[in-house]
Image (cartoon, rainbow, N blue to C red):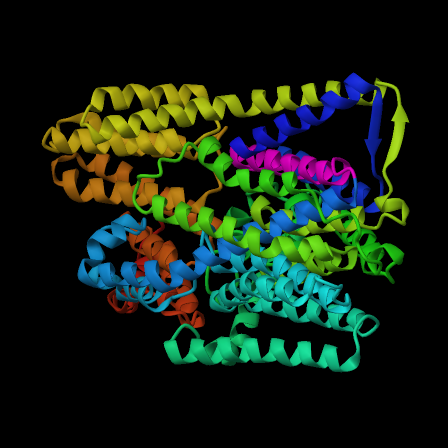
């Protein structure tokens, strides 16, 4: 969220010159209307979000992306500055790609070796549960397989697919610029080949890292863009030169594939299991479509609410599990398709705005180019300062993110990023000085990212989405011979003053919405520090401060419950120490309004906590207290299973919990459903543990018999 504030402050700086000079410059295209409309609709959809806090936080991410797009459209004063910003994007992506290669070759093998040496310690370090239940062997095996068998780099991202979508656009723009370089004849004393050969190094880095990610949707995006570039280049290059370039590219790709297969970085399953990956995507899309078309309350205002209004930013995952197919592989946080993501998040009109923005933007930049795209660039190349300024973004990440470079492996990571950034900037500058970027190249890059996002998530992530919107904006700028790229001027200070007033309202709203969250998170951070130093009283005070600071943030309540568990343990975990009773109460408050009550995992966590307390203190409680706790566990588990109806494990737990309070009819029904779902799901980590499956099958006849022999429990 600090990034949002940095973008808003940049916008404030951009308003100072027109206020002082009385000259307001801007560009306009219909694509801008689509992008701004999409940003607005995504932002206001936060009002329907069940988890209001995450919805509002991500709404401001969208607002910052919209402002960044407008800045990219309006601030560059000419072709050179737009080309320089495009160069900065390519250089930065090349540095990230270099770190991705380093991660895949050096860091991931080290993590795997450490995991083999001490699995328990590494599970805790990567955020997995500490102890593994021997009865839960499929999930343990899935975790082991994910850590030990996965070698896809993800660099500074959370997922390899996100990295792939980030890299493909800059790679396409570099290819487009290289083809333009081939079309320009060498001048006396200035050969084209040194610049092209120097640019080949970052190009190979981008291509190598893209291949290592195994991001098939990004590969398809690259092939689509390569087809566009080839079709365009047939007008600029002799057939033999174009054929030679194609053969060279084919040899490079084939070499990377062979080396990947030989070294184990690639495996035949990447291609042979493409149909399996597509099947997973289709499962996500079917469930998302069911979510979008949920009729809801047909008689009230909520009818087809998801169709028209969506579920709000960041809230897809908690709604998705209600519609997840029984055979689907995982609980995804987005539908892996940019159009469905826009529709599911903010409704039909957001989908329409996205489609209009892409059509209105890609159409002009991919149309037959004007003279400005084929003539030589005699301006001396793009100015240096925008490129240097883009490199300072790495330093700003450290400052804004308040990163300690001496924590864990951050120093090596940032050294690789910084040194490679400088090196690649020096290598690419000669090519950009010679030919610069073209509108068609930027449009092809945006098209490649859009194709990649058709089957992978990332539309709501600024680092990925800004590659789409950034290349689209710069492509429109570079069409200087058309209205979209021509700067327009308004004399007078009133436009800048009006925008400044709008900016003040925007930032005021931003601070009003986010300052409570920042205060709450700061208090949570103080509580964690206090826990590390065993100052439990200070930790409790900090959690109480966090709860009061932001009533929409569930994290303080969860942390407070964990703290109460630690205090109870430290005091001997005695049944007469009634502090243990606060644990389920705090967990219940974490899923009570104004916090989102529809988070299945938190209800499941609450049920598990009650079950653990029953095992530890149940023998010392009165029968009424035991029944009350068991009823609470049934209620929490039933809520979780209703929110995630295709989860076989939840159904099995609900069956056994219901039987424990003599609700045998419910127990039998839930057991049958658990066994049915277990049979439908082919994924080992989603199936019931063998002991649980056997127990349900053995108990089911008895539960049926007891259900028919006795009246149902009140």
Q: Looking at this view, is 652 or 389 the one in front?
A: 389
Relative height, residue 526 to residue 164 (above, below): above
Magenta-tinted stretch: 48-77
Q: Residue at x 46, y 46 (%)?
A: 418
Using the image, determine if residue 573 lies above or below residue 484: above
Q: Residue furthest front?
A: 189
> Who's the residue at 39% across and 42% down the image?
602
Which residue is pictured at 35% across the width and 27% down the height? Answer: 524
**In the figure, residue 206 lies in which quadrant?**
bottom right
Viewer-proximal residue, 622 or 523?
Answer: 523
Percent across and percent down for residue 652 are 34, 58
Magenta span: predominant SS is helix
Numbered label tally: 0
Judged left or right of residue 492, residue 405 is left
| Depicted 109 relative to depicted 478: above or below | below
From the viewer's perspective, tell me whether residue 497 is left or right of residue 634: right
The image shows residue 586 at horizontal and vertical percentages of: 33, 30
Q: Is residue 171 left or right of residue 239?
A: left
> Is 74 included in the stretch rendered in magenta?
yes
Magenta span contains residue 106: no
- 657 to 208, vertically: above or below: above
Residue located 73% across and 59% down the image: 441
Residue 359 sits in which quadrant? bottom right
Toward which corner of the image does residue 490 lie, by quadrant? Answer: top right
Residue 605 position in % (x across, y down): 34, 44
Question: Is residue 535 at all visible to an observer of this figure?
Answer: yes
């Amino acid at each position: 969220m600090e990034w949002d504030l940095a973008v808003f402050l940049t916008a404030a700086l951009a308003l100072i010159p027109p206020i002082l000079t009385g000259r307001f410059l801007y560009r306009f295209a219909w694509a801008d209307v689509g992008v701004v409309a999409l940003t607005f609709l995504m932002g206001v959809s936060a009002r329907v979000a069940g988890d209001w806090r995450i919805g509002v936080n991500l709404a401001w991410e969208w607002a910052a992306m919209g402002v960044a797009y407008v800045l990219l459209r309006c601030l560059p004063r000419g072709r050179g500055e737009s080309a320089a910003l495009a160069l900065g994007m390519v250089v930065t992506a090349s540095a990230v790609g270099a770190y991705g290669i380093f991660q895949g070759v050096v860091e991931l093998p080290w993590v795997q070796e450490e995991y083999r040496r001490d699995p328990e310690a590494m599970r805790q370090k990567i955020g997995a549960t500490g102890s593994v239940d021997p009865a839960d062997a499929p999930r343990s095996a899935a975790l082991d397989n994910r850590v030990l068998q996965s070698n896809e780099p993800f660099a500074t991202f959370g997922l390899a697919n996100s990295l792939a979508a980030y890299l493909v656009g800059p790679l396409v723009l570099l290819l487009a610029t290289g083809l333009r370089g081939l079309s320009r004849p060498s001048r006396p004393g200035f050969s084209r080949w040194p610049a092209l050969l120097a640019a080949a190094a970052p190009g190979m880095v981008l291509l190598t890292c893209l291949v290592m990610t195994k991001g098939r949707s990004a590969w398809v995006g690259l092939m689509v863009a390569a087809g566009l570039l080839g079709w365009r280049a047939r007008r600029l290059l002799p057939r033999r030169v174009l054929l030679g370039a194609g053969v060279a590219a084919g040899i490079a790709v084939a070499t990377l594939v062979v080396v990947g297969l030989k070294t184990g970085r690639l495996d035949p399953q990447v291609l042979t299991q493409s149909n399996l990956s597509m099947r997973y995507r289709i499962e996500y899309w079917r469930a998302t479509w069911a979510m979008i078309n949920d009729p809801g309350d047909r008689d009230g205002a909520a009818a087809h609410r998801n169709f028209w209004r969506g579920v709000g930013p960041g809230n897809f995952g908690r709604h998705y599990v209600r519609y997840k197919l029984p055979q689907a592989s995982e609980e995804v946080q987005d539908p892996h398709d940019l159009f469905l993501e826009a529709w599911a998040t903010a409704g039909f009109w957001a989908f329409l705005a996205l489609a209009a923005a892409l059509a209105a933007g890609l159409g002009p930049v991919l149309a037959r180019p004007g003279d400005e795209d084929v003539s030589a660039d005699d301006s001396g190349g793009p100015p240096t300062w925008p490129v240097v300024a883009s490199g300072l973004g790495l330093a700003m990440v450290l400052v804004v993110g308040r990163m300690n470079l001496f924590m864990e492996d951050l120093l090596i990571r940032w050294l690789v990023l910084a040194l490679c950034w400088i090196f690649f900037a020096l290598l690419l500058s000669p090519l950009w000085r010679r030919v610069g970027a073209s509108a068609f190249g930027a449009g092809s890059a945006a098209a490649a990212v859009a194709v990649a996002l058709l089957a992978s998530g990332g539309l709501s992530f600024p680092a990925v989405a800004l590659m789409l919107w950034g290349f689209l904006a710069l492509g429109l700028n570079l069409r200087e011979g058309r209205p979209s790229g021509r700067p327009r001027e308004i004399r007078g200070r009133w436009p800048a003053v009006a925008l400044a007033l709008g900016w003040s309202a925007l930032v005021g709203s931003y601070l009003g919405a986010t300052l409570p969250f920042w205060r709450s998170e700061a208090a949570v951070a103080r509580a964690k520090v206090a826990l590390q130093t065993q100052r439990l009283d200070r930790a409790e005070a900090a959690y109480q401060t966090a709860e009061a600071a932001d009533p929409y943030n569930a994290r303080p309540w969860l942390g407070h419950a964990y703290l109460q568990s630690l205090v109870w343990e430290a005091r001997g975990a005695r049944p007469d120490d009634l502090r243990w009773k606060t644990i389920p109460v705090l967990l219940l408050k974490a899923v009570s309004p104004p916090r989102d009550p529809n988070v299945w995992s938190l209800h499941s966590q609450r049920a598990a906590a009650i079950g653990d307390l029953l095992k530890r203190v149940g023998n010392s409680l009165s029968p009424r207290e035991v029944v009350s706790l068991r009823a609470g566990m049934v209620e929490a588990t039933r809520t979780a299973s209703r929110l995630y109806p295709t989860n076989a494990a939840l159904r099995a737990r609900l069956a056994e919990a219901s039987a424990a309070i003599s609700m045998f009819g419910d127990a039998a029904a839930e057991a049958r459903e658990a066994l049915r779902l277990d049979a439908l799901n082919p994924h080992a980590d989603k199936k019931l543990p063998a002991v649980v499956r056997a127990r349900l099958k053995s108990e089911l006849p008895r539960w049926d018999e007891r259900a028919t022999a006795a009246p149902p429990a009140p």
